[in-house]
Amino acid sequence: MIVGGRELLDGLVKVLMERWTVVAPREVEGNVVLAPLEDAGEIVLDRPLNSPKEYLLPQEEILFEYRDGGFKAPEPRGYAILGIRPCEFRALLMLKSVMGEDPLFLSRWNSSFFAVQACTEPCPSGFCGDLGGPEFSGIDPYRPLGAPDLQYYTLDGRVFVDALTERGKEVLGALRDLGEGATEEELERLRMRISEVWEDMKRVRVVGIEERARWDHPAYSYFAERCIQCGACNFECPSCFCFDIRDEDEGAWVRVREWDSCLLEGFSKMALGANPRKREEDRMRQRILHKFKYFKETTGFYMCTGCGRCLEACPSGIDLREVISWLWRE
Amino acid sequence: MKLVRTVCPYCGVGCGMIVKVRDERIISVYPERSHPSNAGTLCIKGWKGVRYVGHPDRLKKPLIRKGGRLVEASWGEALRTAAQGLGNALREWGPESIMVVGSAKCTNEANFLIQKFARAVIGTNNVDHCARLCHAPTVKAMFRMLGSGAMTNPISDIDLAEAYFVIGSNTTEQHPIIGARIIRNLDGKELIVADPRKIRLARLADVHLRHRPGSDIPLLNSIAHVVVEEGLVDWEYVGRSEGFEKLRRELERWDPGRTQGITGVPPRLVEEAAEIVAEKRTMFFFAMGITQHETGTQNVAAVVNLAVITGNVGKPGAGINPLRGQNNVQGATDLAVVPEIYPGYATLDDPRIGEFEEVWGTSLPREMGVMLSEAFERAKQGEIRAMYIMGENPAVSDPNSNLVRMALEDLEFLIVQDIFPTETSEYADVVLPAASWAEEDGTITSTDRRVQRVRAFINPPGEAMPDWWIITQLARTMGADWEYNGPWDVLSEINRLVPQYRGITWERLEGGHGIHWPCPSVDHPGTPRLHEGRFVRGKALLIPPRWKPPSAWRDEEYPLIMTTGRTYFHWHTRTMTRRVAVLQREVPEPYVEVSPEDAGTYGIRDGSRVVLESRHGRIEVRARVSDIVPRGVVFVPFHFAEAAANALVGEEKDPESGIPAYKVVAVRIGGVAP
Amino acid sequence: MAVEGVSWVPRLTRVLERVQHTADTVSLKLDLSLNHQPGQFVQVSVPGVGEIPLSVASFPGDRLMITFRRVGRVTAALYGLGVGDSIGVRGPFGRGFPLEGGDVLLVAGGMGLPPIRSALGSILRERDRFGTVQLLYGARRPSLLLYREEYDAWRRGDVVVSLIVDEAEDGWRGRVGVVTELFDELEVGSDATVLVCGPEIMMKFVGRGLLKMGFDPKRIYMSMERHMKCGVGLCGHCNIGPYYVCRDGPVFDFETLRNIPESGVI
Ligand SMILES: Cc1cc2nc3c(=O)[nH]c(=O)nc-3n(C[C@H](O)[C@H](O)[C@H](O)COP(=O)(O)OP(=O)(O)OC[C@H]3O[C@@H](n4cnc5c(N)ncnc54)[C@H](O)[C@@H]3O)c2cc1C
Ligand code: SF4
Ligand code: SF4
Ligand code: FES
């Protein structure tokens, strides 16, 4: 681990820019957006309004084009993604456990570099307490599935950068001149801060919830009644992977996929109108059970890592923490 | 790669969004966190709907009719042909033979120019847009009673209210982010919904007043009756208004026990509603559900009365909020794309018109022009000979669409300016390809009077051009000496001529989230809330609303009431939304909502094909059996050309505002197939 | 997890033959041989229009045949194709019907016959591996019965073919009713393997009826239908309970389905 000032962070971006398009939180007229940087100095420390999912599974992308008698399939390149939070990185691991077979996803994943920003401030909407907590540690429950290349912390105006993979060490090596080793005292303060934040994030318990998520729980219809079907909770969720596929015909045959939402009626509707999830509450149930029960049963992990993005994006204020608490209560 | 901050092109909520663009394609859409109206959220149309801009069907070249067919032409030729066509009509039949139609989808700048084109280049007040079909009654009634026809509160005031009174607005479908913002506030607050349909907000309401279609005035008056009788009147506000005594006398006869016979609403619910609005800081919301009636203007008056006597105007979290449909219907109205006023609500006898004459360097018409709702009838009678339609599709959206199509057929000359070919452009002599929302800089005015910048971030396809440019060129081709180098020049003319917009300059709109009009000077912060401390009119005017039962009421022959409206997933005539895969998937075809009781009576099953007939037309649609509609009422969305609900609507109109009575049409089931 | 080595690019092939079965149902035979397991499906593309799942109706190793009804956008476009037109194919995907020998009961309703036809093809090729083989097939009307010209060949191959229709038409001398009424003609034993494909409501009653007659729910196999997009376990559309119909199905045993409230067959 090396410690330095803001130059260390800028230096990191510069080093990565030599090999990647760097995606990091940056300011867009009063908003913080996770987006490609043009300049190293643009990176900010605030949590961006969008999740990193689109840099592995874009909102919309071309699967193939057929023109002049031949197919052309894209071979997209990944990004160096900075400033995503541990919860989001874990969610990307969940995404990979499903999408890992997808050629476009895989091509991006294999050529991506991840630098996670550990949370040294509690976040207002997250609940990662049970799901790994505010840093991606060596004993992280998700460690067997992968690790970010780097992790950085910020505390009292100082930046702490740590490498978790070989590739990360290489990059860190190039930054030696911009920082120094961390003192025992600094590390201790950092550990304290992380454990405080962690305590704070434990207010919502998740482990064991699969036992409580009954098929006929009243929570589904209660929340479904309030859902306006905007799809945002799915779109903003870094682990939701569902997509729709459509064809375009612009002189050439183009097949496109785009993010989809299981809360929409058409998601499961079949020709002539038959729909196994016709009612809104059936779809709300699907969203909850898929995340907290089915996925857990088949992979051992929840398909939710407590980042809180869904509740931030929900116009109706549907709060997943509230849903979970209700499942516990009844 | 570009990140551009702009505003959603769909509804009047005016949600801020950031789009990420690469290679002329929208890569991502993000809800803007810092925007006060949507605060990091969007509805599905915002998330998904904007991708229509890249659709291959876009109009890319001007078209002119040659030998009965529309063929590609150069801009020069198209403009010349258009100018000639209008010029001929002008010479042969005079300015009153030409109708100009603006669009609530287009920018303030485009709309300002189109009305200027009608008035200054053609010399007629025959200019209108679809607000006629939505909120003309609102403007009429609220302007008269309060001095301003617009929403009194900013959207963010929803968080400050203690109660909500929603009437005639399916808010979560039509203004989704406003509807959802009400929902997220419901804990500990009260919601009253007056709607015949059990819409989402009604299902969440503390009080659902399920009144019969067309009985809004009896319902609202009975609530006001209770307010007066129970001594719940806000005397301070009565003191700030005039006409209370007359209103009080009128209200005497509307006691809830008696009105129940008309409305079907139990008095207990009326009393509950009265107590809530009298005691809580209440925001009133309404939309087409009360305006699209023969008594539309009076309906609005009844809402205003109730809000004023309960002191619910001009306060944080209390006010009267007509929800405007299209993203810029507010702006198109402010800038007078209507025949009865000049920009900034200058009436036809207002001396301010002299100022317009001075600036525009020509004398201007002062006679009331033709309203959109009469235009097609007039066209059929040969009074209107030519039309210039920008960004609207009356062949589907207008009432009595059969008549509209015949009228379009009869026109001597028709110019259609749009982004896609439409049912209307099929009749055109000249089709002018316009830039879309994504390709045109300008400003729009959202429903809460928030004037905001929209930004061009891709190039128009082919030879399509921004609306302001097209109108300017056409005016110049017709001999006008218009000089605009960009929409900013148009806005500065608006700043000069429209008092409400005086301080809302191009430079000021660059950053931030827009400015609420009225904004009288460049150092004025704008006015998020109207009537604070004092009504714009001085004293509010209370008007005893006159009620008459709808003339298209059901009878033995036509025993059902059809009401029409929008659905969440589509927009108007779907020129945009049917080209968005996910939106089209959700509602791929027209339907009619039928109550389970009526379904039983007629042997209709969910998914049956049903023939629906009125005195004016018939359509065939699939049935959705649903308890959203009450027995005796059916609902049909108006988006679909293949089953245009508006073909069933007759000629009944609100005499005061000209709005067609879309909300109450007597129909019958003319046949059912499984 | 998902199918290994997913590719989005279909194989392009051509229509060799088009057979009109009813007013809205046709079969297309394609210039492509598939080694599939009966019950599996292919993702069929109409270029520029879209891609949909269709059961393989042909016999393993034969030229690929699909049979479909015109019900929506893509099927309408497919319906409009003629001999020589190009068409895209991905697959075969999913798990098909197990064909391990013994008595086999095949139950099909309406458009559920194509995959059952494919299974029959496999059985007929190795007919002596199986005991009694019986097909129960129901359709709305006699004229909607698919593959009518093939029944004789199936019968000659020692398959009991029992038919029933909801509504009789002129000349129909067979039975009228729902498919479960054919249970009174059963010739297979209750230890038979059962392969079922048809509308959910039909499968529900078939499952119920067979359980009552002592059939083993683990040996009743039903082919499920769900909205599908990718066909390879990625897009999430076909999810039921912890399964993906495209990858873990479309064929599931009844025991599994009975534990999924959403399966629609309980
Ligand atoms: C495993 C499997 C095998 C099938 N085999 C056959 C067959 O052999 N013959 C046949 O006629 N039909 C079969 N179907 C049904 C067939 O896939 C649908 O009729 C078809 O997808 C409808 O597409 P559409 O575009 O015409 O309809 P639209 O209503 O326009 O549907 C739009 C899209 O929704 C999805 N979708 C809609 N309905 C279905 C559905 N029922 N199943 C899956 N996806 C759907 C598709 O992605 C489709 O492109 C099968 C379905 C599955 C799941
Ligand atoms: S974000 Fe909220 S309103 Fe939108 S789909 Fe999700 S739960 Fe529904
Ligand atoms: S609420 Fe209106 S402005 Fe906001 S995203 Fe939806 S359609 Fe667009
Ligand atoms: S069809 Fe995509 S997961 Fe099954």
Image (cartoon, grey):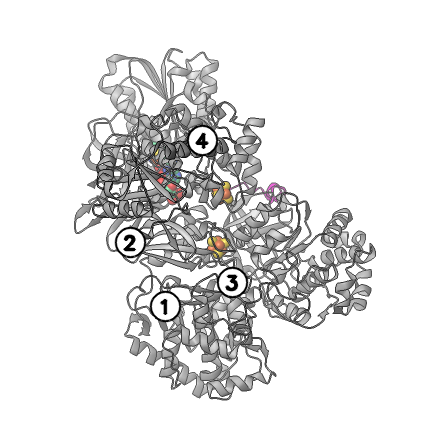
- Name the residue type under label 4: Ser
> For mark 4, does the 10 Å Cα neighbourhood hold few (<14), some (14 to 19), or many (20 or more) residues?
some
Please state which of residues A204 and B574 is positioned toward the viewer in this rendering: A204
Please state which of residues B275 and A79 is positioned toward the viewer in this rendering: A79
Q: Is residue B160 visible?
A: yes
Residue located beneath label 3 in the image: B446
The answer to whether residue B347 is magenta is no
Asked if both marks, 3 and 4, belong to the same chain, the answer given is no
Task: Determine whether the residue tagged by mark 1 lies in a helix, strand or loop.
Answer: loop
For the N terminus of chain B, give its image quadrant. Answer: bottom left
The disc label shown at residue A195, or none: 4
Q: In the rendering, at what x and y percent does residue B102 appear?
A: 47, 71
Q: What span is colored magenta in the figure?
A: B595-607
Of all chains, the one bearing label 3 is B
Measure how far apart labels 3 and 4 are at the Cα level: 46 Å
Task: Determine whether the residue tagged by mark 2 lies in a helix, strand or loop.
Answer: loop
The disc label shown at residue A39, or none: 2
Task: Determine whether the residue tagged by mark 3 lies in a helix, strand or loop.
Answer: loop
